[in-house]
Amino acid sequence: MVAQDGKLRDTDVLNTKGILRLIQSIPSKKAEPFKMWLAQVGSERMDEIADPQKAIDRAIATYREKGYPEEWITQRMLTIKTRKELTAEWQDRGITQEKDYAILTNEMTKAWSVHRARI
């Protein structure tokens, strides 16, 4: 990686998964609370895989904890549902590349913005 002095330096780096694995390997009692939290979060995500409604409920609870109004939460959940339906339709019509999804989303946003400006 490039250092502050502009020179290249050998550096060890980890992605998120690597960092979590590293933390799991730390043989310290001080790391135990974090390891327990990781185990709890992992268990919750596995439960959400088995029952996706749990992920939806968690998202709603998080929005409420952050103080978002119920109307906003309802609209957000509807937006997510609509977006999933739209991307499923695009996939059914042969869109497979992330770049293509980005292009289509950008075009829709531009069209929406022009329409909103006229209102």
Image (cartoon, rainbow, N blue to C red):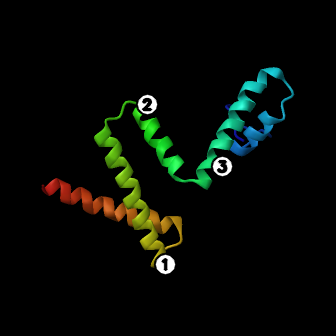
Q: Out of 13 and 83, give the one closest to the viewer.
A: 83
Using residue 82 as the reference point, say whether residue 113 is left or right of it: left
Q: Which residue is mark 1?
A: 94
Q: Amino acid at mark 2?
A: Glu
> Which residue is rendered at x = 62% and y = 46% of the image?
45
User: Mark number for residue 84?
Assistant: none
- Residue 30 drawn above or below residue 25: above
Residue 29 sits in quarter:
top right
> Which residue is rendered at x = 68% and y = 42% of the image?
42
- Residue 107 drawn above or below residue 1: below
* Mark 3 secondary-structure assignment: helix
User: Mark number for residue 65?
Assistant: 2
Q: Is any part of residue 6 visible from this angle?
A: no
Give the x, y percent position of residue 34. Answer: 71, 28
Q: Amino acid at mark 3?
A: Met
Residue 114 sits in quarter:
bottom left
Q: Which residue is mark 3?
A: 46
Q: Amino acid at mark 1?
A: Gly
- Does the CB distance between marks 1 and 2 fall below 8 Å? no
The crowd level at tag 3 (other Cα within 10 Å; few <14, some 14-19, many 20+) is few
